[in-house]
Structures are given as C-alpha cells and as structure tokens.
Image (cartoon, helix red, strand yellow):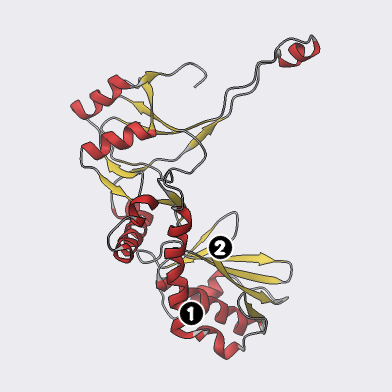
Amino acid sequence: MSFYFALKTQSKITTDDILSALTKSDVAALQTDAGTVFYHPGQSLRGVILYETNDGYDIGLNAFTPRIDAYLAREIASVIAKRTQAEVYAEDDELAIPAERIAEYGGEDWIAARENEAQLLMAQSGSQITDQYSTVFGYKRPFALPTSKALSAQDRLSEIDRLMLEGIALQQIDDVEDIYPAQIFTMTFKAPKRRLLDRLKGRPQQDAPPDRHFFTVTEETRTLTPAPMNFGELEVNLVDKSNQTRAITAENLYNHARSLGCREYGFGSFDLTLSGDDFEKIFAEARALSPLA
C-alpha cells in the first residue's frame, strides 16, 4: 500500500536544492537503485521516495510510516512544484493541485488517512493464521512486523504505535551503537555440468540445489540480525573464535535469542552477543557446512 504524487515537468531539480528548501534542516537523503529516499533521522521509518519518470517525478509514501513522513511527502511535492513549475496530481484526485495548496493538501484528514494505512496493512498481512510476520522496507533496512501477534493484541492501536517506534529505532541503531548489522546473502548453486549430457542420453537429470539464504553471527561479536524477507528458509552461519563455521536455521537462532532475553525489534531483528556457554550451546546443535555451502 502506498500513496503517490505525480509531478509533470521538464525541468530538473537536485537533491541539494530540495534539502535546502525544506522547512526542517535535519532531513537527510539516501540514493538507492529505485530513487532518492528522504527521511528525518531518528523519526522516520520508511521515509519518502522520489522517482524520476519520463515526464517528471513521482513521490511515493509507503504504508506503515509515521506522520512526520506524510508531512515530508507533501512538502517535497510543494518544493518541486514551486522550483520547476510542475503540475502536481495526487492519486486520489483527477485535478491538478494548485502550487499554493500542495503543502497542506488534504489537511489533517489526509495525514490521518496515511496513518490509518498501517492498520490496513497489518490486517491484510495477518489474514492467514500461519503468517508470522510481514516485512516492510525502512529507509535504511527492512523491518519485520509480527503480524499475528500484533493483530491479537488487546489494544491493537497501541501495539502498532509501539512497533512503529521499534522500526524507527532499528533504522539508526548502528549510528548510535557499536553493533555489526548482519546482512542476508544468497548463494546460488549451478546445476551439474553433466546435466546437458544426461538430457541428451535420456538419463534422469540432476537439478541444482535450491538457493541458500543466510547471514552470519560471530562469537563474541555484538550483532544486529537482519529482518527475514519471505523468500524461503533462512539460515545462520555461526562462526566461532577459531573461525570454524556451522549452520542452523534462523528460527533456531530466534528461539535461542528469545530464551536469553535479547532485545528483539519487531520480528527477527535481534541485538545479540553470543559468547561462552550461550554460544557453545547453539554451536553444538548446528550442522557442519559442506564445501558447497
């Protein structure tokens, strides 16, 4: 779920031009493959993304983000419109928005509607009992929402507000803490070279193993585990002080981290340091990695 402003203009504007024209000086920008993400450090969750299009720009505001990002989306649209004389269209209105109205478009009702999309996103994501989490992309890193748990909370609105704050904190934790943010890597296995010969000779073909998705946790290293991404089984490479590596499922690591009382942001993003018996216990349960994995 998202909301878009479409800006039609042949003129260009730089990121620095936008930042310098905004009311608040704390706004930062991050260049991504998709576009430029603008955000308030320590206050934004998903931020506001600016895309270049064939006829101008699109401004996207994704669901499950705090009010401050909704205000920012309107202000960026206003800045671009005034600097480039762009025609601005909101996705819920067929008429162009006058430049002087863009910064206040929809008033507080529009801001509240964007905030309410968080509830709709949670309800849709948790429509199946088996859904443990739904992952959204923050301005810096993904954040997994424990949908089933949140939807069963006695005060759902308070739980959503709490999760929003956790997602915001997750975006900047490595800026304020000495912690290693682990990343998910994917290892793709090629089919055996003889597969073509097997097919030509009519023999059963040997398929390549499925992709392996994993992140690494090293003994005695404070680590932020990455949010799971809904792409199949996720594993963890455990590396001890002698550089020996073994593997476990992410679910086993999550259960171990929860049993130790490690801080969990949303679902699956833990602030953990495994050492001594806490590391040895789970390392002993892990499997040795084959040369291919």
* Amino acid on which the number 2 mark rests in the picture: Thr
The N terminus - image quarter: bottom right
Q: Is residue 203 left or right of residue 84?
A: right
Q: Is residue 273 left or right of residue 228?
A: left
Q: Position of residue 139 (x, y in %)?
A: 46, 58
Residue at left offset 51%, top offset 84%: 106
Depth order, front residue of 114/49: 114
The Cα–Cα distance between marks 1 and 2, rounded to whole angstroms, is 23 Å
Residue to which mark 1 is pinned? 110
Q: For the residue labelled by badge 1, is the local secondary structure a helix, a strand or a loop?
A: helix
Q: Work out whether 232 lies above or below 150.
A: above
Depth order, front residue of 136/291: 136
Q: Position of residue 182 (x, y in %)?
A: 39, 40
Number of numbered discs visible in the structure rendering: 2
Residue at left offset 29%, top offset 23%: 283
Residue to which mark 2 is pinned? 36
Q: Work out whether 204 lies above or below 70.
A: above
Residue at left offset 53%, top offset 76%: 76
